[in-house]
Amino acid sequence: MLNVVIFGAPGSGKGTQSEKIAKEFELAHISTGDVLRKEMANETELGKTAKGYMEKGQLVPDSLIVDMLAKVLDEKKGSKGVIFDGFPRTTPQAEALKKILNERGTDVSVMLDLQVEEQELITRLLGRGKLSGRSDDNLETIQSRLKVYHTQTTPLIDYYKQEKKYIAVQGMDSIDDIFNRIKETLSTWK
Ligand code: ADP
């Protein structure tokens, strides 16, 4: 199985690249942000709990996210692999992912770190907020998401470096140029 963790700050293009990777390599795409937004729209217990955290730009507690992830993963059984978009975001989540995949006889193949400058991230997210109306794409929430990213999520770079699964991807070019480089990198796993 080809299991890809796509990593990067909010606004780095994880969702956009994930969709293209999923199509090209026939992978199931799991975006924890999208799953949470669906739960919110359906007003489930999880959705109601998640809403408060998401609107403040904070992370939803690990235990809720890990249970949700395991459930969604089992719904995708039989796929050639999975692209994990927006997960893991903390070290406990990365450890849980390893355990969940190992229990299913597989593991993370590679972690792709999409690198984008901070000012560009803010510009992109504000632009998306205007278009999509995503309630967390306003300046105040963006700033807290970036802070959370730097404090809670960046330790995963060292985690995956230690696992020898880390690959940096320059994320400031056009969508297609970035995708072509990712495609080349992932072809070695095919
Ligand atoms: P972005 O990467 O632009 O922040 P996402 O859609 O991935 O967008 O995430 C939106 C919000 O959903 C996050 O700010 C967080 O509150 C919540 N969320 C998504 N994934 C996770 C996760 N793995 N752990 C905790 N919270 C998460």
Image: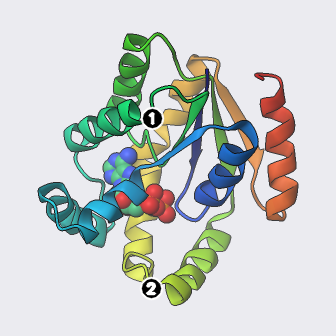
Q: Is residue 60 above or below residue 71?
A: below
How far across and how far down the image is residue 28, in percent?
55, 40
Q: Is residue 80 visible?
A: yes
Q: Quadrant of residue 5?
A: top right
**Nearest to N terminus: mark 1 or mark 2:** 1
The residue at the point 40 percent across, 27 percent down is 97
Ligand 1 lies in quarter: bottom left
Q: Residues within 10 Å of mark 1 (few under 14, many from 20)?
A: some
Q: Is residue 50 left or right of residue 83?
A: left
How far across and how far down the image is residue 149, in percent?
45, 53
Q: Is residue 50 above or below residue 101?
A: below
What coloring was used for the rendering?
rainbow
Residue under label 2, please give it: 133
- Which amino acid type is marked by label 1? Lys
The residue at the point 28 percent across, 41 percent down is 68
The residue at the point 83 percent across, 29 percent down is 187
How far across and how far down the image is residue 131, in percent?
55, 87
Q: Is residue 56 visible?
A: no
Residue under label 1, please give it: 76
Q: Is residue 188 left or right of residue 32?
A: right
How far across and how far down the image is residue 175, in percent?
79, 62
